[in-house]
Image (tube, helix red, strand yellow):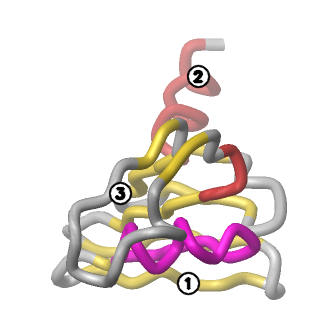
Amino acid sequence: MLYKYTKSFWKKGVRLGEDTALLIENGKNAVCKGSGMTIVLNPHAIRNTNCGSVEKGCPIFVDHIMMTILTDGCRISLSTGQFENARETENSTERD
């Protein structure tokens, strides 16, 4: 997965865990549902990698890749990468 998305700087990589879904809302936002987790890789900030010079299956290095791990109720903007943890938002509202 990492090799594929470090070569495609304009794409985000998404990996779903078992018993997990990523629901896309209005084509712009996504919310994680289920007992597992979702990993979102964003290669836009990569500074250095050897992905362009090695064959598939060979070891690679990647410097400065952004990764977000979502669990049940977490949201992410697919365009900006802005992350929101629903439980944190609920907890901060309850404290006020």
Question: Label for residue 71?
Answer: 3
Q: Which callout, 1 or 3, points at the residue further toward the start of the chain? A: 1
Check disc 2 and report its element: helix, strand or loop. Answer: helix
Quarter of the image containing the C terminus? Answer: top right
Residue at far front of view = 53
**Disc nearer the start of the sequence (2/1):** 1
Residue type highlighted by circle 3: Thr
Residue toward you, 64 or 37: 64
Q: Residue at label 2?
A: 92
Give the residue type that dot 1 points to.
Leu
23 inside magenta stretch: no
Tell me: 76 left or right of 41: right
Amino acid identity at mark 2: Ser
Image quadrant containing the N terminus: bottom left
The span picked out in magenta is 1-15
Mark 1 lies on residue: 23
Callout 1: SS: strand
Answer yes or no: do the residues labelled 3 and 2 have beta carbons within 8 Å?
no
Q: Which of marks 2 and 1 is in front?
A: 1
- Relative height, residue 1 to residue 75 (above, below): below
Number of marks present in the image shown: 3
In this image, 14 relative to 25: left or right? Answer: left
Going by the image, does 62 lie left or right of 36? Answer: right
Q: In this view, does 31 lie above or below 43?
A: below
Residue at x 62% of width, y 46% of height: 46
Q: Position of residue 34 (x, y in %)?
A: 29, 74
Q: Name the spot of residue 31 as percent of width and height, x first.
A: 56, 70
Q: Do the residues labelled 2 and 1 touch (CB within 8 Å)?
A: no
Residue at 50% in and 61% down: 41
Residue at point 56% right, 43% down?
Answer: 48
Comes first in the chain, label 3 or label 2:
3
- Residue 70 is left or right of residue 46, and the answer is left
